[in-house]
Image (cartoon, helix red, strand yellow):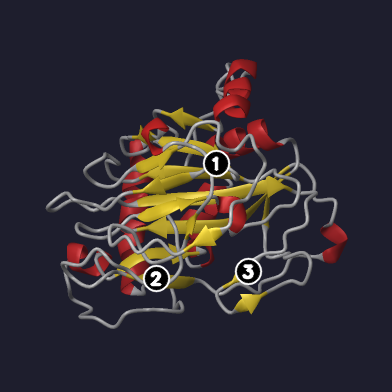
Amino acid sequence: MSWPAPSAASPLADPARERFAEVGYLTFERLLDPGVVEALRAESVGICRGERGAFLGAVAGDPSADEAEVLARYQHVYFPHKLSPLLREVLASPPLVAVAAGLIGPNVKCAQSMLFLKAPGQPGRAWHQDEHYVPTRDRSLVGVWIALDPATQETGCLWVLPGSHRRGVVWRHRAHGDPAFDPVHQAAGFPDAEEDAVAIELAPGGAVAFHGYLLHRSLPNRHPTRPRRAVSFHYASAETLLPFMGATGPIGGADCRDVVLVAGEDPLVAEGIADVVTPFAQAAARPGSLAGSGGGAS
């Protein structure tokens, strides 16, 4: 994959970083070029067909099924960069590293990747903070979420509560009982008003980068035919410890070393890089249902 040369004018000049500190997110009209987006769409189908390797939670199905049926088997796949060389390349590509390093600092590691397949009729994810799932201890976590299909209010785009990261609180999770969302518990007790939420609508290749403490959610895909595919990557300072949880339970003790260094130096390089996290998937909700099962995402 070829990447454009970095522009002379950084997309993360001081005003952008100041806005990120204030509201907790930045949007980019086009972070990935159309050719990369098209390749990632095709890769999403290959992953769901099992053509990129086995993963936990794979759903049996007709291998000759059409693209829409294959994508509709899953809500999301976790750690797809361990299955796909393309996704591994994208997570360390110049456009994404420019954003991550611009917000985090010179030494940056990627802790997680996710592939979202939200087919028509699939539920959203209730209010949550990514720091709840990927604890960085130093509050350096930044998610970069990239649309592969149009992410609109109809297809179930992200919504954010601007400035909700500034309290520095990771809110407790509680059951919600709302069939519009998957059953993973939602953040509860925060004082932000839902009417202050902002919809992040993106064209394919557009992206949003957001703080690990920022409250965000997505709504169901109510488009009759269009999936809402996206990929996201979670970055953190290379210096931070990462007490991360995998599909099979705690991994890495106090610091998971199953990471990818994407910028600068790794001060913990003497501890090595591990390969302990197994890619896994969450199956889609039943046809016609807006209730899912398993782990959460957006």
Instruction: Please give the residue where the numbered disc 2 appears in the rendered image.
Output: 282
Alpha-carbon span between mark 1 and mark 3: 20 Å
Q: Are marks 3 and 2 in contact (CB under 8 Å)?
A: no
Alpha-carbon span between mark 1 and mark 2: 23 Å
Q: Tag 3: Cα neighbours inside 10 Å, few (<14), some, or many (≥20)? A: some
* Mark 1, secondary structure of its residue: loop
Type of the residue with mark 2: Gln
- Left or right position of 295 against 120: right
* Mark 3, secondary structure of its residue: strand
Instruction: Please give the residue where the numbered disc 1 appears in the rendered image.
Output: 214
- Left or right position of 234 against 253: left
Compared with residue 18, is residue 126 higher up or lower down, i.e. above or below? below
Residue 15: x, y in percent? 60, 16
Residue 33: x, y in percent? 39, 35
Question: In this rendering, does residue 131 appear at all?
Answer: yes
Please tell me which of labels 3 and 2 falls first in the chain: 3
Nearer the observer, disc 1 or disc 3? 1
Q: Tag 2: Cα neighbours inside 10 Å, few (<14), some, or many (≥20)? A: many
Q: Residue at x 72, y 69 (%)?
A: 274
Q: Residue at x 59, y 25 (%)?
A: 22
Q: Nearer the viewer, residue 87 or 138?
A: 138
Please tell me which of labels 1 and 3 falls first in the chain: 1
Instruction: Please give the residue where the numbered disc 3 appears in the rendered image.
Output: 245
